[in-house]
Image: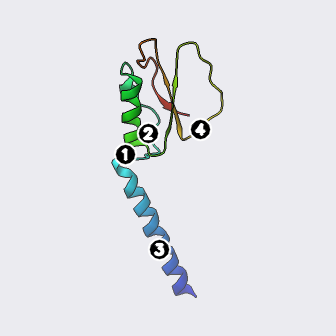
Amino acid sequence: MAESFKFICVIIIFLCSFIAAKNIDGRNNPTRRNWSELVGVTAEEAERKIKEEMNGVEIRVVPPGYFVTADYNTQRVRLYVDQSNKLIKTPTIG
């Protein structure tokens, strides 16, 4: 019984290490919360860059004067743009 418990613990530790190592390259990196370097670029460029780093993200472009809901979504990034479709605010998860 004790040996099987140790074996299960080793497997769990191995799987956790594997998952952590997979996120080192920046894809779906939970520590990445914003992309301040994208302010001033077009919404298309920003969307491409964010999607390179975050699989399955939902990108929402927010034109000037539009309202958004106050809910928080870890798979959504809003892109606030001006009339020329360039980012005017740092894109953040939420």
Q: Residue at 37% x, 45% y: name it.
A: 26
What crowding class fits label 3: few (fewer than 14 Cα within 10 Å), some (14-19), or many (20 or more)?
Answer: few
Of the residues shown, which amino acid type is indicated by label 4? Asn
Say which label, 4 or 3, has the lower sequence index: 3
Q: Residue at 43% x, 59% y: name it.
A: 19
How many badges with numbers are in the image? 4
Q: Which quadrant holds the N terminus?
A: bottom right
Residue 15 locus on image (x, y percent): 45, 67
Please state which of the two labelled residues, at mark 3 or mark 1, is closer to the viewer.
1
* Contact flag, marks 2 and 1 (Cβ < 8 Å): yes
Q: Which residue is mark 4?
A: 73
Where 39 sits versus 84, above or below? below
Left or right relative to 86: residue 60: right
Residue 54 locus on image (x, y percent): 43, 43
* Contact flag, marks 3 and 1 (Cβ < 8 Å): no
Q: Residue at 62% x, 35% y: name it.
A: 72
Q: Residue at 46% x, 13% y: name it.
A: 82
Q: Which residue is mark 2?
A: 32
Of the residues shown, which amino acid type is indicated by label 3? Ile
* Contact flag, marks 4 and 1 (Cβ < 8 Å): no
Element class at badge 4: loop
- As measured in the structure, the alpha-carbon distance from the residue carrying label 3 to the one carrying label 1 is 25 Å
